[in-house]
Image: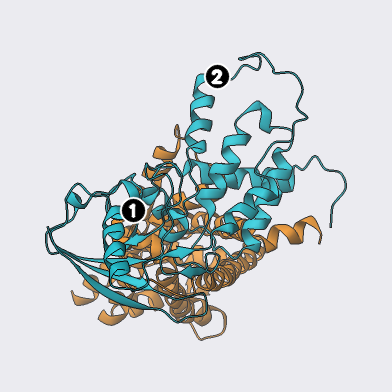
Chain colours: A orange, B cyan
């Protein structure tokens, strides 16, 4: 077996793949969030539509987006491989178990939280990514340039209470997933030192609260706006 | 005080096993949990019944023999305590206490509460040692080690190999045990020569035994009777990275 195959066949090697793809997806969240904050700009969606146009046409972004999809798929596949392996490690369970006394709920349910995020991603991509690439999106022109009017699609989607509500629930799932996953990735990479781990844990918690909160504020904002 | 014991009984590795309930009347609150089972076993023997099999040796919390999942937690409800050091005063009068063996594929049940923990021995055999040709006795303190490093290595070395980490982990992962055994040597000068080989072999053996992977729930560390820190698991991960990516071995074996 080559050394690389050995790494991938080891449980720790698989965990390292999970942590690296996880951290990569975290970096994507920052980019995605900062771009989407343009939705709040009071310009009838001009800045957001131009940004969306850039993100779907720029060749470099297109390459990065393929890496991103690969990152998501690898993260999901390895989580399944590891979960099955972990299930097999305890074929007979306990009759009386009190895990709540030694660990947090979120840390034990990363799989379920991940599944919520995956379902969200599929619905989210069907609503916007698919419409943008294969569907029919109305167009708008800014200074003579005709671009897809994704802003209108977003506004329409978030005016439905169940759709906006689903987004908020998914972001709560994301928050719990991140609050364990962020610091956990550092631990898996072996980057735990009593000196800086407390700081990583604090940043992890802050990130897990702020990022999903800002994401969730978008459907809430547009839903409230649609009522007016 | 009175308690009700609900204990896992299993004749042998192939038996399906079941719970049996025993009423314990007027027990001394200063008894340890193992002594409670001793009392029960005496009674069972008097009645001509098979006593409950369980591992025990030193009964002072340092050998790592006793292994019982008491009321949903390894070694019971007290922090940093083995089952032999757990006293009945920590239970409520009339409490129902459920006792089960460690549950893991790598720890098959031999009988009742006794499990086969030789998987741990095989991990140690794979590399949890240093090879030194013995000669004359070296002077004490010939090799300088800082106090901080010595303390950290010693903390890792307090692992008694009881298996509570595996029992507590939702994935039945042995990472805390292996990390303590790797750390105690990786931190000290004597452990440097075989450092990479050790990490490589012990981790490979850990996987081969069928233990699960770590998901950083930290249940192991919370339940460890010696309170081995999670930092050790990170150190193990780092040792793995170094052994794989930065290996001194030029030839690739196997």
- Label 2 chain ID: B
- How far apart, in angstroms, are the residues tagged by discs 2 and 1? 42 Å
Q: In front: mark 2 or mark 1?
A: 2
| Residue at 14% from the left image edge and 63% from the top image edge | B25
Q: On residue B105, which mark appears?
A: none
Q: Position of residue A195 (x, y in %)?
A: 45, 31
Q: Nearer the viewer, residue B166 or B85?
A: B85
Left or right of A125 in this view: B31:
left
Q: Is residue A135 above or below residue A14?
A: below
For residue A210, which numbered disc appears in the image?
1
The structure residue drawn at horizontal position 57% and vertical position 49%, both measured from the top left corner, is B178
Task: Say which of B191 and A202 sits in front.
Answer: B191
The quarter of the picture where residue A164 lies is bottom left
Tell which subunit mark 1 falls on: A
Q: Is residue B99 above or below residue B35?
A: below
Place of residue A15 in the rendered image (x, y in percent of width and height, measured from the top left): 58, 58
Helix, strand or loop at disc 1?
helix
Rendering coords of residue B176 (x, y %): 50, 49
Residue B228 in sight here: yes
Examine the rendering and report whether any part of residue A219 can be seen.
no
Give the class, few, some or many, for how many residues have Cα within 10 Å of label 1's Cα (few <14, many ≥20): few
Secondary structure under the numbered disc 2 in the rendered image: loop
Circles 2 and 1: CB distance less than 8 Å?
no
Give above or below for B254 relative to B129.
Answer: below
Q: Which quadrant would the C terminus of chain A be assigned to in this image?
A: bottom left
């Amino acid at each position: 077996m080559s050394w690389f195959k050995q790494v991938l066949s080891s449980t720790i090697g698989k965990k390292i793949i999970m942590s690296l793809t996880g951290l990569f997806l975290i970096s994507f969240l920052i980019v995605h969030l900062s771009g989407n904050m343009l939705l709040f700009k009071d310009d009838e969606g001009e800045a957001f539509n131009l940004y969306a146009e850039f993100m779907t046409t720029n060749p470099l972004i297109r390459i990065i987006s393929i890496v991103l999809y690969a990152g998501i798929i690898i993260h999901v596949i390895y989580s399944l491989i590891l979960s099955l392996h972990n299930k097999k490690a305890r074929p007979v369970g306990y009759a009386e178990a009190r895990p709540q006394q030694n660990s947090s709920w979120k840390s034990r349910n990363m799989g379920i939280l991940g599944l919520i995020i995956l379902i969200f991603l599929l619905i989210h991509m069907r609503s916007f990514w698919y419409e943008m690439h294969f569907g029919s999106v109305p167009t708008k022109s800014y200074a003579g340039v005709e671009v897809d009017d994704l802003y209108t699609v977003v506004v329409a989607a978030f005016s439905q209470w169940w759709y906006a509500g689903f987004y908020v629930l998914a972001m709560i799932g994301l928050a719990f997933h991140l609050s364990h996953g962020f610091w956990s990735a550092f631990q898996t990479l072996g980057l735990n030192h009593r000196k800086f781990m407390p700081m990583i844990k604090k940043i992890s918690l802050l990130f897990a609260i702020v990022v999903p909160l800002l994401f969730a504020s978008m459907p809430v904002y547009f839903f409230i706006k649609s009522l007016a | 005080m009175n308690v009700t014991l609900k204990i896992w009984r299993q004749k042998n590795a192939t038996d399906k096993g079941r719970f049996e309930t025993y009423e314990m009347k007027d027990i001394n609150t200063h008894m340890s949990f193992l002594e409670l089972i001793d009392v029960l076993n005496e009674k069972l023997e008097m009645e001509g019944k098979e006593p409950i099999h369980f591992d025990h040796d030193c009964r002072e919390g340092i050998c790592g023999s006793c292994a019982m999942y008491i009321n949903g937690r390894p070694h019971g409800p007290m922090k940093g305590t083995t089952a032999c050091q757990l006293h009945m005063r920590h239970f409520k009068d009339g409490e129902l206490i459920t006792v089960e063996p460690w549950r893991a594929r790598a720890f098959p049940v031999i009988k009742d509460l006794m499990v086969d923990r030789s998987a741990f021995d095989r991990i140690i055999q794979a590399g949890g040692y240093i090879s030194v040709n013995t000669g004359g006795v070296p002077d004490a303190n010939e090799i300088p080690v800082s106090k901080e490093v010595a303390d950290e290595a010693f903390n890792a070395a307090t692992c008694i190999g009881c298996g509570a980490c595996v029992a507590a982990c939702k994935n039945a992962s042995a990472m805390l045990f292996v990390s303590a055994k790797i750390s105690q040597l990786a931190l000290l000068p004597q452990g440097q020569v075989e450092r990479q080989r050790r990490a490589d072999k012990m981790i490979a053996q850990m996987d081969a035994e069928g233990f699960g992977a770590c998901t950083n729930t930290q249940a192991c560390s919370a339940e460890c009777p010696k309170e081995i820190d999670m930092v050790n698991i990170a150190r193990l991960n780092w040792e793995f990275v170094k052994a794989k990516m930065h290996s001194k071995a030029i030839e690739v074996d196997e």
